[in-house]
Image: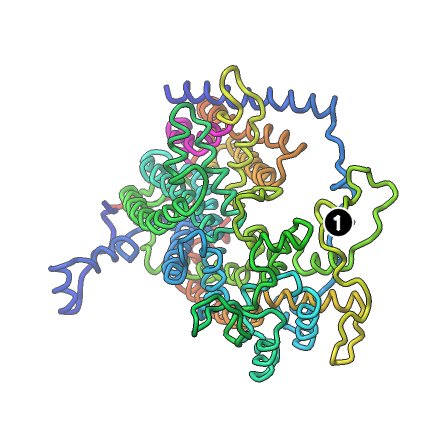
């Protein structure tokens, strides 16, 4: 009885799926889906590597500091970094006094309550504070940015397919729209063509428009590519500050497990020796 | 029940004897995973995934309990509390990555364990109840994993919750109230997040309870084995301890090597980038996909693109998706072939290989965007999936001529006939 009902249900599901396949295939052949411009003109992230890549990867602190400088002088005007605190900057090589100075002199102050009056007020930041947001809220952010809300950058390299190479590609990927781009995909007012962006046009104007927008204290030549690479590296750190600790712990754990597993395997062989010997005899007999 | 030749527990110390009289817990352990449980001597490495699934269940519970100490189940701060764990809690990043990847390894183990049962006929008499409890564990694990993925309250959490609870909407009459009951509202929000957290903490312990019954049900007939032939005498078995504790022990080490390599060096490889964006009800992600272990079922859901008479395609997809798993409950009665092991079923073997490839294809299509040609491929693959369990297996059990079975496990291993116990 179960089998008869089962066969009937199976015939229904499989049969209808095959009919659906037939109808779908007919549609696919007679009316093939047109390739969209977003698909045709979109480019995969550029091939670029960072010192933190791979299981042995480590941060290049000099580069992170340069990247921080780019964030501070360029990106922070519009993009928040809400999961990172000033104190975290010690992890990329600034000392305590430098961190205090960076926090105190940050262009945007930290909102607080005035201890004397209880009114909303702004005060200079302390190392314990998170980076203050450039806009009070999303409405203010959208109003100042052609209705687009600049995303928070703390997790951006983990929150986008392609990670840091995608961020680098986007920053260096602005160009004039190609001649054969359909009208519907031409950048509208306030939009900018960038083939690395999913729908080809984004509201952010090229943030790194010219070489030497920042002047690096370590004499590195601040080309657009260099600044983009440095800030992408910095954003790997903001998204995954424990990356080095993770890699180091990983190797220690693997070394321990490897030894433990070899020992466990050897004891398994020893324990099974008598049973295996009996089996071996069979192979020898045959 | 156990075999009559099973070793008997005899406490040697005075404390052991006192304990055995008052609470025979050591005796219980001895008889379930100790020397007192005789297991077939010929179990291959496919029999290791049960203990591995158990291992990862424990990993999930331990890491999950610690995460719950720092996580805040509130829609306003859930996302930030996860980032707090990643940045400010001591080793919090390790606990969270272990939990996120542990879920994947639990499902890898459970899928291989299910595959083993399907090939070697472990669902057949006298082990139907064992199999049914296993399917219950799998269903509970799916619910637990789904609700766990909602907790970080990222974009994929939110939209996954919306899509999956939206499936219930397709059910006529009661669908909408069920969906509202699941969510505690009309869309995923704080009420949904809170009940998902509560249930995500509860269900693993329900799973532990069913696992205990699953092992209990295993110990009544004892383990199946690669020949599918019943245990006939003492020579066919070895004591579980030390033989299978040692074998499980080293494969646990091996599994942990794969697990830690992934969680320390590629911790986000199995996740989705969109879940690092905080949930936003006003912005729909381009492709909403569940975690990889749900992809085959997701492909079946999306394979139904045409209404059947008065039944809308969406309802068909939902029915088919649930049926695809519920069919396992009827498997012991659909496949009536008296031969358990697929090794001795020449035709079944071929269909089984096709099924494995079929499920992998379904999985690939389930993770791909809902575009052609993936929809057409899922339609063919889903058609085979249902045909395999509901048409091929029932017919095959009458049509197929199995190969001769070995007389005993011992004979299949050593080539010598089993000496019948005197």
Q: Residue at x 59, y 44 (%)?
A: B285
Residue at the image point whose x is 50% and y is 53% from the top: A284
Residue found at the far top of this picture: B309
State which quarter of the image contains the N terminus of chain A: top left
Q: Tell me if B236 is positioned left or right of A247 in this view.
A: left
* Crowding at mark 1 (Cα within 10 Å: few <14, some 14-19, many 20+): few
- The colour scheme applied to this rendered structure is rainbow
Q: Secondary structure at mark 1?
A: loop
- The answer to whether residue B82 shows anywhere in this view is yes
Viewer-nearest residue: B296 or A160: A160
Q: In the rendered view, does B65 fall on the left or right side of A144?
A: left
Q: Position of residue B380 (x, y in %)?
A: 60, 28
Query: How many labels sit on residues?
Result: 1
- Horizontally, residue A152 falls left or right of residue B102, namely right
Between residue A240 and residue B297, name the one nearer to us.
A240
Mark 1 — on which chain does it sit? A
Q: In the image, what residue occupies the spot 88% across and 43% down?
A: A179
**In the current view of this chain or complex, which residue is farthest to the right?**
A179
Residue B135 rendering spot, x and y as whole percentages: 38, 39
How far from the left and from the top, in percent, is residue B297? 51, 36
Residue at image position (60%, 40%) is: B364
Read off the residue under disc 1. A190
Would you say residue B322 sits in the magenta stretch? yes
What's drawn in magenta, residue-wise?
B317-341
> Dominant secondary structure of the magenta stretch?
helix
Q: Quadrant of residue B222?
A: top left
The vertical placement of B229 against B39, above or below, is above
Nearer to me, B73 or B27: B73
Of B385 and B234, which appears nearest the observer? Answer: B385
User: Is A245 drawn above or below residue A269 in the view shown?
Assistant: below
Residue B216 location, x and y as percent? 27, 46
Verify whether residue B64 appears in magenta. Answer: no
């Amino acid at each position: 009885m179960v089998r008869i009902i089962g066969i009937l249900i199976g015939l229904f599901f499989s049969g209808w799926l095959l009919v659906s396949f037939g109808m779908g295939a007919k549609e696919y052949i007679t009316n093939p889906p047109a390739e969209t411009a977003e698909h045709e003109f979109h480019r995969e992230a550029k091939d670029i590597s960072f010192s933190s890549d791979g299981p042995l990867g480590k941060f290049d602190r000099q580069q992170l500091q340069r990247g921080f400088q780019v964030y501070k002088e360029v990106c922070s005007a519009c993009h928040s970094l809400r999961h990172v605190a000033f104190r975290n900057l010690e992890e990329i090589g600034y000392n305590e006094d430098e961190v205090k100075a960076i926090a105190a002199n940050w262009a945007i102050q930290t909102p607080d309550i005035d201890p004397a009056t209880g009114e909303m007020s702004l005060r200079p930041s302390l190392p314990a504070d998170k980076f203050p947001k450039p806009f009070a809220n999303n409405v203010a952010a959208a109003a100042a940015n052609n209705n687009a809300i600049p995303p928070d950058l703390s997790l951006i390299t983990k929150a986008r397919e392609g990670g840091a190479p995608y961020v680098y590609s986007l920053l260096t990927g602005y160009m004039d729209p190609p001649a054969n781009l359909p009208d519907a995909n031409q950048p509208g007012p306030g939009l900018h063509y960038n083939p690395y962006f999913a729908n080809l046009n984004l509201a952010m104007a090229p943030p790194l428009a010219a070489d030497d927008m920042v002047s690096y204290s370590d004499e590195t030549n601040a080309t657009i590519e260099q600044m983009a690479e440095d800030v992408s590296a910095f954003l790997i750190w903001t998204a995954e500050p424990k990356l080095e600790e993770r890699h180091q712990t990983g190797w220690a754990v693997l070394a321990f497990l490897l030894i433990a597993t070899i020992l466990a395997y050897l004891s398994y062989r020893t324990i099974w020796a008598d049973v295996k010997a009996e089996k071996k005899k069979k192979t020898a007999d045959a | 029940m156990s075999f009559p030749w099973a070793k008997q527990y005899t406490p040697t110390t005075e404390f052991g004897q006192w304990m055995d009289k008052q609470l025979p817990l050591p005796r219980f352990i001895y008889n379930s995973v100790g020397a007192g449980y005789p297991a077939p001597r010929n179990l291959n490495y496919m029999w290791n995934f049960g203990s591995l699934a158990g291992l990862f269940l424990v990993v999930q519970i331990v890491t999950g309990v610690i995460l719950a100490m720092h996580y805040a189940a509130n829609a306003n701060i859930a996302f930030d509390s996860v980032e707090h764990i990643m940045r400010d809690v001591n080793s919090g990043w390790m606990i969270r990555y272990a939990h996120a990847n542990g879920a994947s390894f639990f499902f890898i183990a459970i899928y291989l364990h299910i595959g083993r049962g399907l090939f070697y006929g472990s669902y057949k008499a006298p082990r139907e109840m064992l199999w049914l409890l296993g399917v219950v564990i799998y269903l509970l694990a799916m619910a637990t994993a789904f609700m766990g993925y909602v907790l970080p309250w990222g974009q994929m959490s939110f939209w996954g919750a919306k899509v999956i609870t939206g499936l219930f909407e397709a059910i006529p009459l009661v669908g909408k109230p069920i969906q509202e009951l699941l969510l505690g509202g009309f869309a995923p929000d704080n009420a949904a997040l809170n009940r998902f957290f509560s249930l995500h903490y509860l269900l693993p312990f329900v799973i532990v309870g069913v696992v205990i019954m699953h092992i209990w049900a295993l110990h009544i007939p004892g383990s199946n084995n690669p020949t599918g032939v019943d245990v006939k005498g003492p020579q066919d078995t070895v004591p579980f301890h030390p033989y299978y504790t040692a074998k499980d022990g080293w494969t646990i080490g091996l599994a942990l090597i794969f697990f830690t390599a992934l969680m320390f060096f590629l911790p986000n490889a199995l996740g989705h980038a969109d879940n690092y964006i905080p949930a936003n009800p006003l912005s729909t992600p381009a492709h909403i996909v569940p975690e990889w272990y749900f992809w085959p079922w997701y492909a079946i859901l999306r394979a139904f693109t045409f209404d059947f008479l008065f039944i809308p395609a969406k309802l068909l997809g939902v029915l088919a998706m649930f049926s695809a798993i519920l069919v396992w409950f009827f498997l012991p009665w659909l496949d009536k072939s008296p031969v358990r092991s697929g090794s001795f079923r020449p035709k079944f073997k071929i269909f089984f290989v096709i099924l494995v490839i079929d499920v992998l294809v379904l999985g690939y299509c389930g993770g791909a965007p809902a575009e052609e040609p993936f929809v057409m491929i899922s339609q063919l693959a889903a058609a085979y999936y249902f045909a395999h369990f509901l048409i091929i297996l029932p017919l095959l059990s009458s049509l197929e001529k199995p190969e001769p079975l070995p007389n005993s496990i011992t004979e299949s291993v050593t080539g010598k006939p089993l000496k019948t116990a005197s």
